[in-house]
Amino acid sequence: MDEDQYRAAYNEINPNRCIFEKAITNRRCDCSLKHPFILATREGVACQSEKALIRCTSVLNSMRNNARFSLKVITIDGPMPHNKELQVQAGGMLALQSLLSHTEPSIASTDSKTDLQTVTNIHKTLQAALEQYSSIEQLPYGEIVKGIVKYVSRPKRKKNKE
């Protein structure tokens, strides 16, 4: 299957692509509304709620816009390059989760298999954030951007000295 065929098939079977797909497939976030699938040995994630997808899209776009300067990205017309997009998705949600739980990001829930921080449920985290801060515009983007900038997708390996 070539890349064009893959994209056509992907868009056909997944009309509600999860906006946080990169963070979910990297196992840094999870969501109760996700619908995972595999197409041509690649993982994909659909959203089961159009209303939640609209809200997630608005929040992620706001995170991108607020983090643009800190990430040294001049213009944003949609998703950023892969690593920066993962940094915004996972780093932003981890920061938001830690703000809501009043914990330091370094001790926010960790995946016991990998010792990496994870967001347990994007949908519930965003619901709680909107209850606490009233609207997307009122979210504490200063703190969220700090979490985005600090986010490391994969810790560097230690070299064995032999």
Image (cartoon, grey):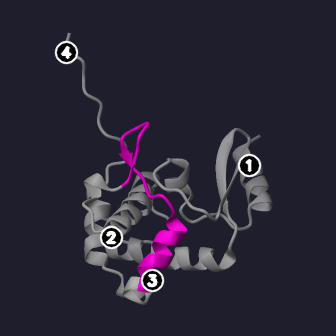
* 2 in relation to 162, above or below: below
Contact flag, marks 4 and 3 (Cβ < 8 Å): no
Viewer-side label of 1, 3 = 3
Query: Crowding near pointer 3: few (<14 within 10 Å), some, many (20+)?
Result: some
| Comes first in the chain, label 4 or label 3 | 3
| 17 sits left or right of 80 in the view | right
Distance between the alpha carbons at the discs numbered 2 and 4: 38 Å
* Residue 115 sits inside the magenta stretch: yes
**Residue that label 4 marks:** 161
Residue at image mark 3: 130
**Residue 144: image location, x then y, percent:** 31, 70
- Residue drawn at x 36%, y 69% as measured from the top left: 96
- Mark in the foreground, 2 or 3: 3
Which tag is nearer the camera, tag 4 or tag 3?
A: 3
Does the image show residue 68? no
Q: Name the residue carrying label 2.
A: 67
- How far apart in space, not on screen, are marks 1 and 4 (Cα)? 44 Å
Q: Earlier in the sequence, mark 1 or mark 4?
A: 1
* Residue drawn at the location 70% of the way across and 38% of the way down: 41
Residue drawn at x 32%, y 70% is 67
Q: Nearer the viewer, mark 1 or mark 2?
A: 2
Q: Which of the 4 quarters of the picture holds residue 130? A: bottom left
Q: Which residues are magenta?
A: 109-131
The quarter in which the N terminus is drawn is top right
Q: Which residue is mark 1?
A: 6
The kind of residue on which mark 4 rests is Lys
Q: Amino acid at mark 3?
A: Leu
